[in-house]
Image (cartoon, grey):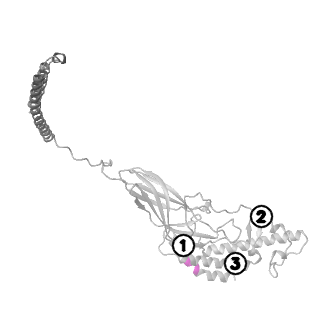
Amino acid sequence: MMDVLIGVLGAVIAAAIGAWAVLRARRPRRADVEAVDATPLEIARQHERDAMQEFVRGHDEDARRLMTELQRARDQAARERATSQPPQPAPRAPARRALSPSGEGPRVEPIDVSVPDRPARWMDPPVVDLKLRNRGGESAVLKRMVVEVLWARRITAFSDLLPYADISGGVWLPPSATYVLELPEPEDADGTRITVGLSQVIGAGEADRFHVRLNTEIPPGDDYPHEAPGAISLYMLRLHVLYNADDRQVKFRPLAVACPGNLLPVPTKKAIRKRITEFQAKVDELRRRIDQEMATRGMEPSDWIANPPRTPGDLPADLDALSRGYRVNANFWDPKGAIRLFLDDAERICREISQLPLNLPDGLDQAVSVARTTLGELPALRRENS
């Protein structure tokens, strides 16, 4: 059909060109008609122009009809091509990530969480030891950890009973601010959540282990701040590790932590007796040194039983026994009063611990039991030292 229409259109165009050439050949040149009568020639030319215009109008109508037929033929051919082409495939769904042969993604599970005791470095912040395993078929990216404080308490520190403060060593300083996690003070900690950024990757079927150091404000002791803190900060924590873009969670069991050192000394009958005995021995030794130095100077020794010195003013001010490496405290001048206050502190500590919630992890339940036992033994200890 297309070939026929194109051929007809070509024939029409050729006929128009031929008619124009005939008229061009019959038209005399300007030089030939200048000397003849113009009237018959103008009439003839008018007839020719009328005939040519009629011819052209007829061919214009034919050309328009031909163009209309040609456009219809083109539209028909386009429809035929569209129906003859195979159907286009449906859009493909986005490719899924390649999984393991079992088709399982990452699945991180806790192995263990603990806070090792550090008796040798008991003034250091405790360190949480976390172990995890990825049992899934893809790597897991650990992004952050959320530490939830279930509850917190301030427990009075069970310190030594001494007749002096050792000033020969360095002063105890609070920890620096370079630790990973800063816990709030116990009075403001209940219910708080602290977030720690992580950057760990656990491969499929692999395990991982990392540490989180815990820090909190530790109040110094009432005496020279060198040997012991004034209180132990006790926290019950729950750790949540979040991994991958969808924030999947790994929940660990509740964890008990004591700051500093993860140590919670609990007074016992044996420990109380031992510290009182050691205190009395240190007092007696210091008294002997004072008496020896005074005897060397030709001075009468003090009567430590009937009329003992009560203040530093009752002794010479320049005694080496009172100034070299030691600073005599109030306990030395009133040993019986110091023992009585020491027993009061032990009772207060035991009551604080015995009021902790029941069924605590990480040995705290045993600490509660020991504290309650000591409370029942304190009246006898008071009678022994009255």
Foreground tag (3 vs 2)? 2
Q: CA distance from mark 1 to mark 3?
A: 23 Å
Q: CA distance from mark 3 to mark 2?
A: 23 Å
| Number of dots carrying numbers | 3
Q: CA distance from mark 2 to mark 1?
A: 36 Å
Secondary structure at numbered mark 1: helix
Q: Quadrant of the C terminus?
A: bottom right
Residue at position x 37%, y 50% in the image: 138
Provide residue 318's location: percent of width, then percent of height. Answer: 86, 68
Secondary structure at numbered mark 3: helix
How many other residues sit within 10 Å of disc 1, few (<14), some (14-19) or many (≥20)? many
Residue range highlighted in magenta: 370-375
Question: Circle 1 is placed at which residue position?
Answer: 367
Magenta stretch contains residue 137: no
Residue at position x 66%, y 82% in the image: 382
Amino acid under label 1?
Ala
* Among the two numbered marks 1 and 3 on one chain, the one whose residue lies closer to the N terminus: 3
Q: Which mark is residue 66?
A: none
Amino acid under label 2?
Gly
Question: Circle 3 is placed at which residue position?
Answer: 339
Q: Are marks 1 and 3 in contact (CB under 8 Å)?
A: no
Q: Quadrant of the N terminus?
A: top left
Amino acid under label 3?
Ile
Question: Circle 2 is placed at which residue position?
Answer: 325
